[in-house]
Amino acid sequence: MQRIPAGFLPPVAMDMASDSPMYQQLSDWFRRAISSGQLRPGQRVPSTRSLANELGISRIPVLGAYEQLQAEGFLETFTGAGTCVARAIPSDMTMGRIKAARPEPTTRSGSRRTSLRAAQMHTPEATWLANMGAFRVGLPALDAFPTALWSKLVSRHARHLSPEAMGYGDPMGHLPLREAIAEYLGASRAVRCDASQILITTGSQQALQICAHVLLDPGERVWMEDPGYPGAHQALRTAGAELVPVPVDAEGIDVAHGTRVGVGARAVYISPSHQFPLGMAMSASRRMQLLRWAAQNDAWIIEDDYDSEYRFGSRPLSSLQGTDTHARVIYLGTFSKVMFPALRLGYVVVPHDLVPDFHAARDAIDTFSSMLYQSVMTEFIREGHFARHIRSMRTLYMERRVAVHDAIQKYLGERLEVIGTEAGMQLAGLLPHGVDDVAVSRKAATKGVSVRPLTPCYIVAPERGGLLLGYGGANLAQIDEGVRRLAECF
C-alpha cells in the first residue's frame, strides 16, 4: 500500500442558499485550492464520508464532486490508502500562482518598514562559514566528543523526566547546574561568585544581547577592542550603542587610548584571557588600569571568556572578574567551544545588585533554556566527565595547533605571518600588504576551505589584512590538505 502524506484541509466554503449544486460548489472549491497552492500535489484529502459529516450534508454531492475531480485529473485514489491531490500536477505551477497572487509589499514614499536597528543587524554574506572542516573558526573537535557517554546521559534523563523538569523553568537557570558552574569557575578561573549570580543563556551571543539590554540606553558609548568579535559588534549596535574602537597591542586593549577617545563610555567589551581574533593575553598592568577606569567612571566591563580552558604555554590565566573589587565586571562563558555548539548553553556571572534586572531580561526574551540539556550538563560536570574532556581536548588541540603551524611553514612560508599561537582553538596570520583577505577567504571557500578574514573584525580599516584559521574541528589530514589548498589561493 502506497503511503500518502497527510495534510490539513483549509475551511471549505459552501453557500447553502446558492442555486449552484453542492457537488459543483465543492468541485470549484477544490480546483481553486489546488491551483492556488492551498492543497499540494500528493496531499491527502478527507474521505467522502468524513467531509460530508464535517459539512453537515449528504454524502452524495461529495461523491459526485470527487468523481468529477478524478475524471479531470485533480484527484487520484489509491486502494486502501485514500484519496489525494494528483501528484502529476507540477508543484512549481501551484507555487508560481501563489507568488503571483502575493505581490511584494510596497511602502509610501519616505516610509520605513523596519527600524534603523533592524538594518544594523544585517551582515555581508560570509562564505567562509559554510564549511565544517578546515578551518572553521569556533568549531570544536566533534569527532573526539564522547558521544556515546553523552547520549547515555540524555537517554537516562529523558526516560525519567519529572513534572517539574517538563514545566516552566527558572529564568536564571537550573539551580544544580548553576551550582556546578559556580564551583567550576571558582576552581579553574578564579571567578568569585555563587549560584545566585549565575544566569544560564543559550550562548555568549544571547548573553551579550541581555547585557546590552540591561546596561545600555540607546546612544551610549561602548569601548570595543579593535579588532574584536563581530558578534559583539552586532549585539551592541542593535541595542543602539555607539561603538568606540580602541586598538589592541601585545598587552591587550590600549586603556590609555580608550580614555582619550572614549570619554563618557558606559561599558567596555573585552576578551582578556585570549583576545579575539589576534590571540594575545591582557597584561596585569592593563587589567588594573581598566578596573580602575571602570570604578572611577561608573562603567561596566563585559568580560568574554570564550575559550580560556585551552592554554598551552602555561596554566589558564585568572579571570579579570576575580580581581575586581568594585563589582564592575560581568563575566560571560559558553559551553559551545568546550562541548558542541548545538548544545546552546552558556552563562553570565552577574554582580549581586544586577541579578533582578538580568532575571527580568532573560524572562522577557525566551523565559529559560532547555531543562533536559541543563540537567544532563549538570550530571556531566558532577560526574567528572567535563574535566576529563577538557584535559583530553587540551592535548588534542595542542597537537593540531602544531600541525597547522608546520603546514603553514611548509606551504605558505612567509606569505602568512602567524601570531597568537599559545592558546585557544584558532590562530591568526597577517597577509602581505596589499593582499585582500576577504577575496582570499572567498576563493578558499570555493576549494572547501574555511578561513575567516580579519578585516571584518575591525571597525577602523587595518593596514594589513589577515586570516583566522580554526583548527579545533579539523584532523591532521584535513589540516595538511587545507593549508595546501589555501596556498593555491594566493
Image (cartoon, rainbow, N blue to C red):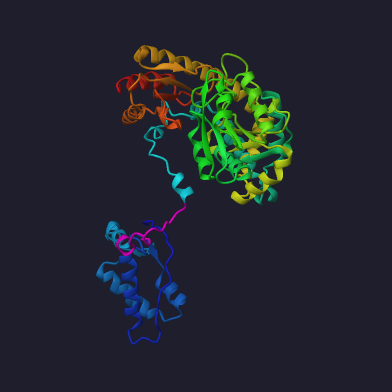
Q: Quadrant of residue 302?
A: top right
| Nearer-the-camera pick, 410 or 69 | 410
* Residue 314 versus residue 289 in the image, above or below: above
Query: Where's residue 380, x and y in %?
Result: 64, 32
Instruction: Reply yes or no: does residue 310 show up in magenta.
Output: no
Asked if residue 108 is among those painted magenta in the image, a careful observer would answer: yes
Q: Which one is in front, 128 or 132?
A: 128
Q: Residue 485 falls in which quadrant of the image?
A: top left
User: In percent of the image, x 42 and y 27: which residue is there?
Assistant: 454
At which x and y percent is residue 212?
A: 58, 42
Quarter containing the C terminus: top left
Q: Nearer the viewer, residue 340 or 242?
A: 242
Does the rendering let one see residue 337?
no
Residue range (magenta):
99-115
* Residue 9 relative to residue 247: left or right: left
**Residue 93 versus residue 380 in the image, above or below:** below
- Judged left or right of residue 140, residue 109 is left
Q: Is residue 163 left or right of residue 45?
A: right
Q: Quadrant of residue 275?
A: top right
- Predominant secondary structure, magenta span: loop
Image coordinates for residue 263, horizontal then vertical, percent: 58, 34
**Residue 207 at least partly seen:** yes
* Percent position of residue 124, x then y: 39, 39
Count the labels in the image: 0
Quarter containing the N terminus: bottom left
Nearest the eye: 212 or 194: 212
Residue 209 sits above or below residue 84 on the image: above
